[in-house]
Image (cartoon, rainbow, N blue to C red):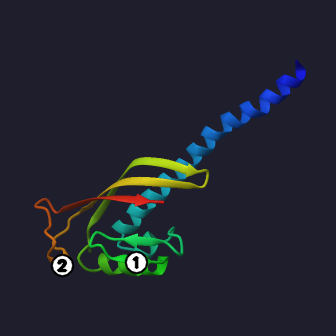
Amino acid sequence: MNRLLFAVLPVFALIQAAPARAQEAETAIRAIVAEQVLAWNAGDGTRYASRLSPDASFTNLFGMVMYGAPAFANRHNEILSTFYKGTRKQHVVRRIRFLTRDVAIVDIDNQVQGVKAMPGGMVVPPDGVVRTQLMEV
């Protein structure tokens, strides 16, 4: 009987620890998303890209595909100094799904407020709010 008790306790400890680790990871992810909003609202594309993987890929709302953190940072510095200058971003995390212990998919409802004009003939909604969905890994 004592042997069985010792075998069950470590498994129970692992089961209890897993939700705590997941909650810690989710809290860290939400902090990163919040920091992105602060960086955008400060007009700082470099800071906005600071947590991006060096070899990341990114497809923007115009369908442009870019590779690498430097390209992402450069593009965001460009847009934050031109047509998105002075805009305010709002992110609402809709879902965080862990694929592995170290990899999560984060679905975000994104709003950019205060948009006055968009390039390429894109129409700005009457309320000046561009609404999109983001997926971050």
Which residue is identified by label 2? 120
Query: Residue placed at 36% from the left, 79% from the top?
Result: 75
Q: Is residue 73 left or right of residue 115?
A: right
Residue extending farthest to the right is: 2
Q: Position of residue 78 (x, y in %)?
A: 33, 81
Among the 4 quarters of the image, the one containing residue 6: top right
Query: Residue placed at 67% from the left, 34% from the top?
Result: 15
Query: Residue placed at 64% from the left, 40% from the top?
Result: 18
Q: Is residue 99 above or below residue 121?
A: above
Q: Position of residue 119 (x, y in %)?
A: 19, 78
Q: Amino acid at mark 1?
A: Met
Mark 2 lies on a secondary structure that is helix
Residue extending farthest to the top is: 1
**Residue 92: which disc?**
none
| Mark 2 or mark 1: whose residue is earlier in sequence | 1
Q: Position of residue 43 (x, y in %)?
A: 35, 73
Residue toward you, 51 or 13: 13
Q: Is residue 81 left or right of residue 27?
A: left
Q: Amino acid at mark 2?
A: Gly
Q: Position of residue 114 (x, y in %)?
A: 20, 65
Query: Residue placed at 53% from the left, 70% from the top?
Result: 53
Label 2 Cα neighbours within 10 Å, binned few <14 / some 14-19 / many ≥20? few
Which residue is identified by label 1? 66
Residue toward you, 2 or 119: 2
Label 1 Cα neighbours within 10 Å, binned few <14 / some 14-19 / many ≥20? some
Q: CA distance from mark 2 to mark 1?
A: 18 Å
